[in-house]
Image (cartoon, grey):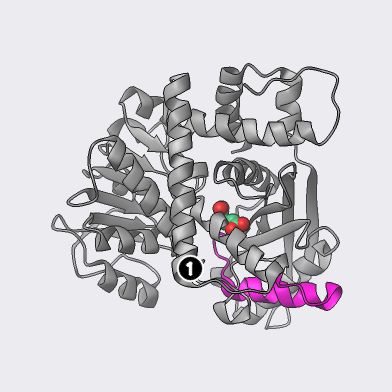
């Protein structure tokens, strides 16, 4: 996975004509943390996990990024995703660097109390290297506001009252209005911008969606509210399709109860894997990495892909889709709404001042549309796809910030 994220970086570094040394410096993480987590399960047996935190780059501010609880979590995953966070925070121009981490546990097999113990142990092991001005975790796959609240509580025992150590907290515990739906809302804005580039709008646009967790379900709801038609949704258990458009609010209720969209009666059952090649104007992968690969990319029917997940398209698939003239809004742009509102939450925590929802949403919309337009301008000027342009913009911002922090004799030009 790390190798794939580096390949996208190098495509942009080629456009900027960066030297091998500068590339190496920009790709190397500042700090890699690996901790042992031993706790007791509810039945008295030992639980043994490994926790990871990779702080990739802090040239533009404290490191920022989610915590993922998943059996596949390892150093390679954390590094690749931390790397993406550095570019993502630069694209939406929030004053953070990039980080990512997590624990190789499976929360679906754990009780709430086991999860809390494991989370507290992780914080205990990392407390010297996280903090409101050092590294600020947030939710990611299988983590939520509860987990963030435990992190804040555990860290505050050590450092004193510190709501700004973590974002994505519950609203009643120093969270922000609009954070929960922010990534999905940003995906919707990114899609609107992409449609505008194609001379279209959301009304009547058909969408196939992979993943119906926090990001996918909020994106689906907002797209449908604006006239888009969600014609198929799938997750790891199966999927459902309806040519006339699925009733998204009912699907949200169903998924909340059954923890899957499979079995929903408002459409026909479909195989989960078929979602990638489903006939629709737009495909939104909102699940895990590598969903679109060399095997299925050739069969993709959508003309626009909005990457709500992190790293859902392999570089091989990306090349195939480019040949098919599919417009891809890359992850580091499309799903940046979450970290954008994390920034607003952190700013509110630092200032001890609460924003209203209208302000959060208006600022988010402004930043997402501006980011999209900046990326598109670079794509036009450099004659590249949106992903390469997004990396170019990010590398320029990170590189210039890093260069300004110290006097360097070598001439390094970020274009
Ligand atoms: N986990 C989210 C992401 O991948 C949010 C990170 C954050 O808010 O810090 O962008």
Q: Is residue 70 visible?
A: no
Q: Which residue is labeled 1 in the image?
A: 178
Q: Nearer the viewer, residue 63 or 269?
A: 63
Picture residue at 39% right of the left edge, 59% below the top: 216
Q: Quadrant of the N terminus?
A: top right
Q: On screen, 413 above or below 304? A: above
Q: On screen, 387 above or below 235? A: above
| Location of residue 19 by image quarter | top right
Residue 150 belongs to magenta span: yes
Q: Nearer the viewer, residue 291 or 6?
A: 6
Q: Position of residue 281 (x, y in %)?
A: 23, 42
Magenta region: which residues? 139-163
Q: Position of residue 339 (x, y in %)?
A: 57, 55
**Horizontally, is 137 left or right of 280 in the view?**
right
**Horizontally, is 180 left or right of 162 in the view?**
left
Q: Whereabouts is ligand 1, in terms of quadrant?
A: bottom right
Q: Nearer the viewer, residue 142 or 372?
A: 372
Q: Nearer the viewer, residue 6 or 71?
A: 6
Q: Position of residue 88 (x, y in %)?
A: 57, 44
Assign a secondary structure to mark 1. loop
Q: Is residue 74 visible?
A: yes
Residue 321 belongs to magenta span: no
Q: On screen, 185 above or below 111? A: above
Q: Position of residue 50 (x, y in %)?
A: 74, 59
**Horizontally, is 218 left or right of 280 in the view?**
right
| Location of residue 282 by image quarter | top left
Other-residue count near label 1 (Cα within 10 Å), few / some / many at <14 / 14–19 / ≥20: many
Q: On screen, 21 above or below 209? A: above
Q: Quadrant of the C terminus?
A: top right
């Amino acid at each position: 996975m790390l190798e794939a994220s580096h390949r996208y970086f190098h495509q942009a570094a080629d456009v900027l004509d960066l030297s091998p040394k500068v590339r190496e410096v920009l790709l190397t993480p500042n700090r890699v943390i690996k901790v042992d987590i031993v706790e007791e399960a509810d039945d008295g047996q030992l639980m043994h996990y490994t926790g990871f935190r990779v702080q990739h780059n802090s040239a533009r501010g404290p490191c920022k990024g989610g915590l993922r609880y998943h059996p596949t979590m390892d150093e390679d995953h954390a590094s690749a995703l931390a790397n993406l966070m550095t570019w993502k925070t630069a694209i939406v121009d929030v004053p953070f660097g990039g980080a990512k981490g997590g624990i190789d546990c499976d929360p679906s097999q754990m009780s709430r109390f086991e999860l809390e113990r494991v989370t507290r142990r992780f914080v205990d092991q990392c407390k010297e290297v996280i903090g409101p001005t050092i590294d600020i975790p947030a939710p990611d796959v299988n983590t939520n506001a509860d987990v963030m609240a435990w992190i804040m509580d555990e860290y505050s025992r050590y450092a004193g009252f510190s709501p700004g150590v973590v974002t994505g907290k519950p609203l009643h515990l120093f969270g922000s209005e609009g954070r929960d739906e922010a990534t999905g809302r940003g995906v919707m804005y990114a899609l609107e911008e992409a449609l505008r580039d194609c001379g279209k709008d959301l009304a009547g646009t058909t969408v196939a969606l992979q993943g119906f967790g926090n990001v996918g379900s909020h994106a689906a709801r907002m797209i449908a509210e604006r006239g888009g038609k969600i014609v198929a949704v799938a997750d790891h258990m199966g999927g459902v399709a309806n040519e006339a458009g699925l009733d998204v609010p009912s699907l949200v209720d169903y998924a909340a109860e059954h923890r899957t969209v499979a079995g929903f009666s408002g459409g026909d059952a479909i195989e989960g894997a078929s979602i990638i090649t489903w006939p629709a104007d737009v495909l939104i992968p909102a699940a895990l990495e590598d969903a679109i690969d060399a095997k299925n990319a050739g069969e993709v029917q959508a003309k626009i892909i909005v990457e709500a997940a992190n790293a859902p398209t392999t570089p091989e698939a990306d090349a195939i889709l480019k040949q098919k003239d599919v417009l891809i809004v890359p992850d580091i742009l499309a799903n940046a709404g979450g970290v954008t509102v994390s920034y607003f939450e952190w700013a509110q925590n630092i200032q001890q001042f609460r924003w209203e929802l209208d302000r959060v949403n208006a600022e988010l919309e402004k930043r997402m549309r501006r980011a999209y337009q900046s990326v598109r301008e670079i794509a036009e000027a450099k004659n590249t796809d949106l992903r390469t342009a997004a990396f170019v913009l990010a590398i320029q911002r990170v590189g210039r910030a890093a260069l300004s922090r110290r006097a360097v004799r070598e001439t390094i030009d970020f274009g």
